[in-house]
Image (tube, rainbow, N blue to C red):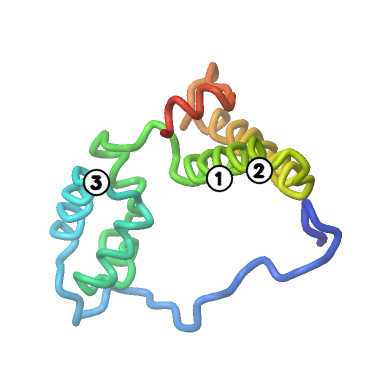
Amino acid sequence: MARMHARRKGKSGSTRMFTRTEHPVWSALKPREVESRILELTKQGYSTSQIGMILRDQYAVPNIKLATGKKISRILRENRMQPEVPEDMKNLISTALKLRTHIDSNHNDYANKRNLQLTESKIRRLAKYYKGTQRLPETWKYSPKLAKLLFE
């Protein structure tokens, strides 16, 4: 199947070489300790992807889902510490804001104008998905002015 914004085909992504079915014995933390570390790191302001990397690199937990039986976002949701805007949406909005500031100073950069259109359409599609899954309220709407106020 072809890509959405490019007319070429491609592989969707890489696969893991070796998949474990259970939490390794050599891992330093038990499941409850992993959950408590996740909550501590969230209080310190880390995002879910940063939490996963910290647990992997510093605490020798290779896979949080194998260790706890839940993903990081589910653990945060159960403890009512879930961020208002999902992390992937936040990253796309910050990319769009960077593109807007670049276009303000470079009016004739048509390639980045197109990239801004593509990024904002991704934001709108993702918002539609999150509204359907009740991760965002139905009244939530993307606008560059509000995004600039919220994320800067």
Looking at numbered disc 2 in the image, what kind of residue is underneath it?
Thr
Mark 2 / mark 3, whichever is N-terminal: 3
Q: Nearer the viewer, residue 62 or 66?
A: 62
Left/right placement of residue 79 relative to residue 117 reads left
Whether 30 is drawn above or below 111: the answer is: below
Image spot of residue 126 (x, y percent): 60, 38
Residue neighbourhood size for the residue with mark 3, other residues' Cα within 10 Å, grouped as few (<14), some (14–19), many (≥20): some
Location of residue 14 (image quadrant):
bottom right
Looking at numbered disc 3 in the image, what kind of residue is underneath it?
Thr
Q: Nearer the viewer, residue 94 or 10?
A: 94
Q: Nearer the viewer, residue 3 or 93?
A: 93
Left/right placement of residue 149 relative to residue 108 reads left
Q: Are marks 2 and 1 in contact (CB under 8 Å)?
A: yes
Image spot of residue 112 (x, y percent): 71, 47
- Residue pointed to by mark 2: 119
Residue shown at the point (37%, 74%) measured from the top left: 21
Residue shown at the point (15%, 74%) measured from the top left: 28
Residue shown at the point (19%, 61%) measured from the top left: 31
The disc at residue 95 is 1
Mark 3 / mark 1, whichever is N-terminal: 3
The disc at residue 42 is 3
Quadrant of image for the C terminus: top left
Residue neighbourhood size for the residue with mark 2, other residues' Cα within 10 Å, grouped as few (<14), some (14–19), many (≥20): some
Quadrant of image for the N terminus: bottom right
Separation of disc 3 and disc 1 at Cα? 23 Å
Whether 139 is drawn above or below 150: the answer is: above
Location of residue 70 (image quadrant):
bottom left
